[in-house]
Amino acid sequence: MGKVYKKLKESFLKDPLTKESTNHYKVSRALLVYSTFAILVLWPLGAIILLRGNAFGLAIALFFSGLQGPFLIGYAFAHTALKQWWRWFVLASGGLGILLFSLIDAVNLDIDGFFELLILGIAGPAIGHTMITTIVGPLIFGRVLCRWGCWRAMVLERLPIGKGSGRRKGVWVWMPLVGISISLIAAVLFALTSKGIRTESFWSVAFGIAVYYVVSIAMALYLQDQRAFCKYLCPAGFILHWTSRSALLHVSGDAEMCTDCNVCTEVCPMDIPVARRVKSGTSISKGDCILCQRCVESCPIGVLKTIFKK
């Protein structure tokens, strides 16, 4: 029994994607500040909205967003080998908040919902959500939603497969344009049949969510890559690629200290050549980094750091 317990413990301590175990500890004060905000602001705000008896879905979303607070505290103090597990708890709580908000209040928060509202010329949650998470927010914080709050990623990351073997060429280079085009076409068709009013229902929103899940999971399994949909077909990812290119919050590395061991490149789920960009002094992100911190955590000499531009 002792040997079995030891093996189970060692297996749990391994990173779910890289299958490696490390021994570094890092605590971010910025994470602790946001954690405090999530607990002291989002939960009370959700309770007030719930007691007022309206926007039940929004209240649930705020509750789950508040859950990110204690999970982020766990992430901040966790052993490096366990940080990605804690990060997934943060991802799942944020993703569930968005997902339940969409289903309970019957609102489409995805890019096609954003396009639809723009075409109809009416306001709605998708406008604010997209502006904050996909257009304006990434200018400062980069693609944090992709790794810390996406309802699709919370499922994709638990699939029994790892990262891909590298970015695919050929037709795959043009797939992001296909994704955003499909989203725009769907929005136009929906707007034309809605007669100028918002006609979303639980079933229409649930159908859209189901389509996203089927396509993203199928792509992941077919290409044996958890983030295949994010790289090649996600319409939000297409926009984020451009709005996050010069984000203030970014991963940076010291070219002189870097030993070019390529561990950071090997663990990157977005197939970014991290080590090569560090050595050349170019931007690590270029619109693709999702700030998962895997490269930062895996660097054996601590070359990489997540910082705000000065």
Image (spheres, rainbow, N blue to C red):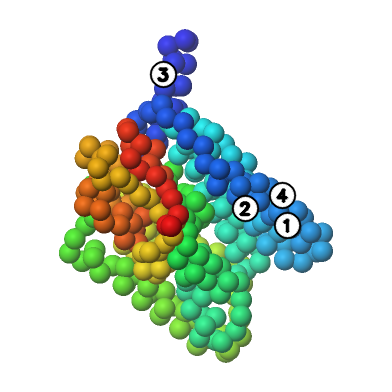
Type of amino acid at the residue the image marks with label 3:
Lys
User: Circle 3 — which element?
Assistant: helix
Query: Are dots 1 and 3 in contact, CB under 8 Å?
Result: no
Residue 164, percent from left and from top:
27, 48
Give the mark nearer the N terminus: 3 vs 4: 3
Type of amino acid at the residue the image marks with label 1:
Gly
Q: Splitting the image into 4 quarters, where does residue 48 fall? A: bottom right
> How far, Cα to Cα, is label 3 from label 2?
34 Å
Q: Residue at x 26, y 49 (%)?
A: 278
Write down the residue under mark 2.
Answer: 65
Question: Could you classify mark 2 by the number of other residues whose Cα lies within 10 Å: few (under 14), some (14-19), or many (20 or more)?
Answer: many
Write down the residue under mark 1.
Answer: 46
Q: Residue furthest left?
A: 170
Residue 157, percent from left and from top:
42, 46
> How far, Cα to Cα, is label 4 from label 1?
11 Å
Residue 129 in the image: above or below residue 166? below
Residue 231 in the image: above or below residue 70? below
Which of the labelled discs sits on residue 40, or is there none? 4
Type of amino acid at the residue the image marks with label 4:
Leu
Q: Residue at x 48, y 79 (%)?
A: 115
> How far, Cα to Cα, is label 3 from label 4?
39 Å
Which of the labelled discs sits on residue 7, or is there none? 3
Give the mark nearer the N terminus: 4 vs 2: 4
Question: Could you classify mark 3 by the number of other residues whose Cα lies within 10 Å: few (under 14), some (14-19), or many (20 or more)?
Answer: few
> How far, Cα to Cα, is label 4 from label 2?
12 Å
